[in-house]
Amino acid sequence: MTTDVVTAASAPRVPVRGGGQFPVHRIYCVGRNFADHAREMGATAPASKAERGTPVFFMKPADAVVVDGAVSYPPGTHDLHHEVELVVALGRDAPAGELPVDAAQALVFGYGVGLDLTRRDLQAAAKAKGLPWDVAKGFDQSAPLSPLVAAADVGALAPRMLSLDVNGERRQQSTLDQLIWDVPEILHELSKLYALRAGDLVFMGTPAGVAALQPGDACVARLDDVLELRCHIRAPAA
Ligand code: MN
């Protein structure tokens, strides 16, 4: 019998409304998926679907997920930003390259709402030098996430309003019909690059209004009255 030689952390689990928990395998993220956010970041937004090219993808480690809403202000930054996002939770596998758009919805277990926390100063430095975004995006506690809700209980996404309030003030909001790439299109594009697995999460990108968070801030992210994430930013861990 072969035994582990060290004890490693196990995969994080996200509570599911109505019971059970969702084990996290990977976290994929989409950049620049709302035109208003692309513009506020200084990028050109596509004028039409025909001009949108290919989506920007990056990843966070699975254990970046925070399910209790408590985020310590991370080290290495003076400009921690919020990005409120729809999060897609996959319930089935798809081999790489074999997921047509019209079959993609069948992979979806459910949805959550989350924050793609970003060290904006490190991201700006990486962009300026043409370097990877990992340290700006893929850090500890960078993915606070609401409980998940089954897809059938969320229904059609397009008319639903994604929003983020910080200390009671609205910072970000958009309906999901403003997504440049919708959920089946994103899963199809991801499938060209990766084998998708049950347990994968996909952060779908953020609308305009990204801004800095400070220790003591309280965030409430929502998708209408269907999904809700409450989290607070604590002082840096000692
Ligand atoms: Mn994002």
Image (cartoon, helix red, strand yellow):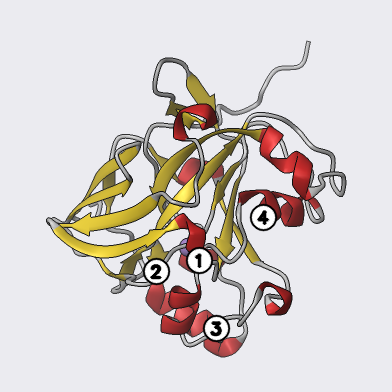
Disc 1/disc 2 C-alpha distance (Å): 8 Å
Amino acid type for the residue under numbered disc 4: Ile
Looking at the rendered structure, the kind of residue marked 2 is Arg
Q: In the image, what residue occupies the spot 67% across and 55% down?
A: 186
Mark 4 vs mark 1, foreground winner is: 4
Q: Kindly indicate whether the residue at mark 3 contacts the one at mark 4 (C-beta within 8 angstroms).
A: no
Q: Identify the disc placed on residue 119.
A: 2
What is the three-letter code of the residue carrying label 3?
A: Lys
Find disc 3 in the rendering and name its residue. 127
Is residue 141 among the parts visible in the rendering?
A: no
Residue 23's quadrant in the figure? top right
Q: Secondary structure at mark 2?
A: strand
First-in-chain label (4 vs 1): 1
Q: Secondary structure at mark 3?
A: helix
The front one of 236 and 40 is: 40
The residue at which mark 4 appears reads as 186
Q: Which residue is denoted by mark 1 in the rendering?
A: 135
Question: In which quadrant is the N terminus drawn?
Answer: top right
Determine the residue positioned at 71% across, 29% down: 92
**Distance Cα–Cα, label 1 vs label 3:** 12 Å
Sequence order check: which comes first, mark 2 or mark 4? Answer: 2
Mark 3: few/some/many CA within 10 Å (<14, 14-19, 20+): few
For disc 2, the neighbor class at 10 Å (few under 14, some 14 to 19, many from 20) is many
Mark 1 residue type: Val
